[in-house]
Every structure is written in C-alpha cells, then in structure tokens.
Image (tube, rainbow, N blue to C red):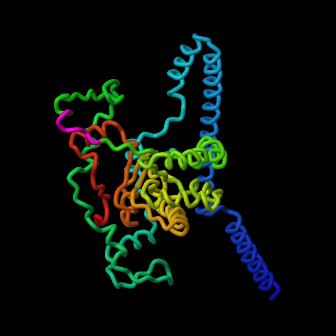
Amino acid sequence: MKRYMVWWGALFFLVMFTSLYLMLETVTSPNTGSLARSEAMEGMEAKIHMIEQDLNKNKELIADIKNWVGLLAKGDDNALGHLVKLVNEKSGDVVAVPKKDDLVKDQAQKPVAVPEALKQDSAARETAKPGEIYEVSPGEKVTVSGSMCSLSSSKGANADIDMHQVVDTLPFDNPDGGAWKQGWDVKYDPSEVSTKKLKIFVVPHSHCDPGWIKTYMDYYRQQTRNIFENMLPKMEEDSRRKFIFAEISYFSLWWDELDAMRRDRVKKLIDGGRLEIVTGGWVMPDEANTHYFAIIDQLLEGHQWLNGTLGVRPKSGWAVDPFGYSSTMAYLLKRMGFENMLIQRVHYSMKKYLSRQQSLEFMWRQQWGESF
Ligand SMILES: [Zn+2]
C-alpha cells in the first residue's frame, strides 16, 4: 500500500513539473510574429543609418561648395575651377534622386499590395449605377447619383490639337535671337502692313502677389497701394485709359481705406467698364500644384467680396504669373460663368507651335468629363 502511494506521488510531481516547464517555455520563447518584427526593425535601423551617412556626406559637400562660392564671390578666379572639379567629382557620391524609369522598373519588380477595402471600393465604382445604394464604409451608405461616375468613366473630350502628342514633337529649345528672344526671326512684307493693319490690344494691368519676397503688408505699403493711388487720378485724366486688376486680397484692403467720395470715383470707373476686375480670386493662384478645392476656395473668397461690395461678377480670367497651368482652371472658370481666360507662362516652343497653327486663341478642353 505504501509503495503504491509513493509511485502515485512521484508520477503526480513529474506531470506537474513537466506542465510547468512547458508553460514557461511558451511564454518566454519568441514566436514567429515577433521574430519577423525584430528582423524588420533591424532592417529599418540599417536603412536609417545609411540615410544618416548620406546626409552627413551631403552636408560636407555643401560646406565645401559654400566655401568655394564664397571665394569666387571675393574675386578668386581659381575658385571656379575648383568648384567645377568638386561638383564633377562628387556628383556620383551624392544621393541621386531616382530617375522616373528606375522608379517604374522598381515598381514593376515589387507588386504593390492593394488593400482589400480599396479593391472592393474600385470594384464597386466600376459597377455602380445611378440610383444604386453604395456602401462607402461599413454602416455608411450613399445613393449613387447620376453625376458621381460620369467624370471618371467618360472618354474625355475630342480636340483637334492633342497637347500630349504635340509635346512629344516640340524641341523645347531656347535659341537666341530674332524678334522673340527665344529665336523666331519674324519676317514680313512691309507692303502688306500698309494695306492690312495689325490690330494690337494693349492691356494695362498690374499683377500683385500677396506673398513672395516681401510680406503681404510690406508689398501693400511699399508698392501695391501706390499702384491704386496712381491709377485713380490717371484714369480720370483721360477717358480712353483702361486698367485691369485681379487680386482681391489687395483690392479689398485698399477699398477699406477709401472714403465715400473716392469709393464713388472707383465705382464710376468700374460701371463705365474702364476698370475691370479679372478672375477676381483672393490671389492669382498656382495651378500646377494646388488642389482644385483650394482654387475654388480662394475664388469664392474674392467673388463673394466683389459681389457683396461692388455687385461685380468677373467674366475674364487673367493668369499671367502661375508657373504651369491646369485645364482644371479652364473647367472651373467656365462652370463659374467665365467667358474667356488668358494664360501666359508657357514655353516658347509651345507658343511658336500654336502661333504657326494660328491657334493661340483656343477652347481648352480638359482630358476628362464633358466639354463645356
Ligand atoms: Zn505672381
């Protein structure tokens, strides 16, 4: 009986210790998930270290360049040679911005994981029909309207000049000389000029950025205010004179300073069609980088002021300074009731091309949606 009890006791302790050991083993040993995490962390650390090294290298190079530029500015002619040598030598060391082709290759090698939710979203968009209930996120449903998909699914406008194709054929060179600085030696027969005179429109204007190298108020106090102050008496001196202005951030600031009599004088010029507000946004916005909502927002700001204060609704767009243009702007202005617009900062190769086609005046159609 006693021996039997001892065996049972020994077996009990053995089972208990084995279970305890197995439990501890499970808690302390790393599982596969945390292994993958620590590997990823190590990889990240290595990459951060590489970026740090590249940054230090670039810092040193910039310090060297600064040094030689400083000497060059002081009149040391040898500095230019050193500078060129340095840039040529080191250009390989600097972290290069990846080329578009490399990025495309890279992209092709690594298939991008599309989240499941996004797959479902795009699948739903493709099949969504007007009137259908569409679940945009769990629990949130919208009814598909007729206009929701029309812009993304339509073929796009037909145009007689397709800028995508034209751009591939243009040289984008900058030859010097000719009537245009960018190399177009315009020749004409003087006898033609005497029979058919060229009609030239001169548009006095001033483009005033509310922010560039000075602050909004510094520009106003030192420049923009003087433009308005000169404009008013000069326009009144000669009834043939005209003037256009675009940026309501400044125009409203000046208006706030005017007494009732001077306001009446300004109104008279506007009502007579001699002082015209063009575009009439808060600013002349960038069109290449801005989101369309930001463009609309500043247009609303300017137009509300104009309509509420002067009862003016601009009809012409004036974009002489944006570095890069967007057909979205043409689309937005058209939908706001504009009749025409002007753009200016376009490469001379493109201007020459359109000029030869006698197409500098054109209807600009965006690539998507309906034409207006
Ligand atoms: Zn500007």
User: Dividing the image into 4 quarters, which one contains the N terminus?
Assistant: bottom right
Q: Does the magenta stretch include residue 24?
A: no
Position of 194 relative to 325 (above/below): above
Figure quadrant of residue 274? bottom left
Figure quadrant of residue 176? top left
Tally of numbered tags: 0
Residue at image location 31% in from the left, 41% down from the top: 200
Q: Where is residue 337 in the image (x, y as percent from the top left)?
A: 38, 66
Task: Answer yes or no: is residue 47 visible.
Answer: no
Position of 22 relative to 253 (above/below): below
Task: Answer yes or no: is residue 333 visible.
Answer: yes
User: Dividing the image into 4 quarters, which one contains the C terminus?
Assistant: bottom left
Residue at image location 40% in from the left, 62% down from the top: 332
Position of 7 relative to 331 (above/below): below
Residue nearer the viewer, 31 or 280: 280
Residue found at the very far right of the displayed protein: 2
Q: Find the magenta span and give its range.
A: 194-199
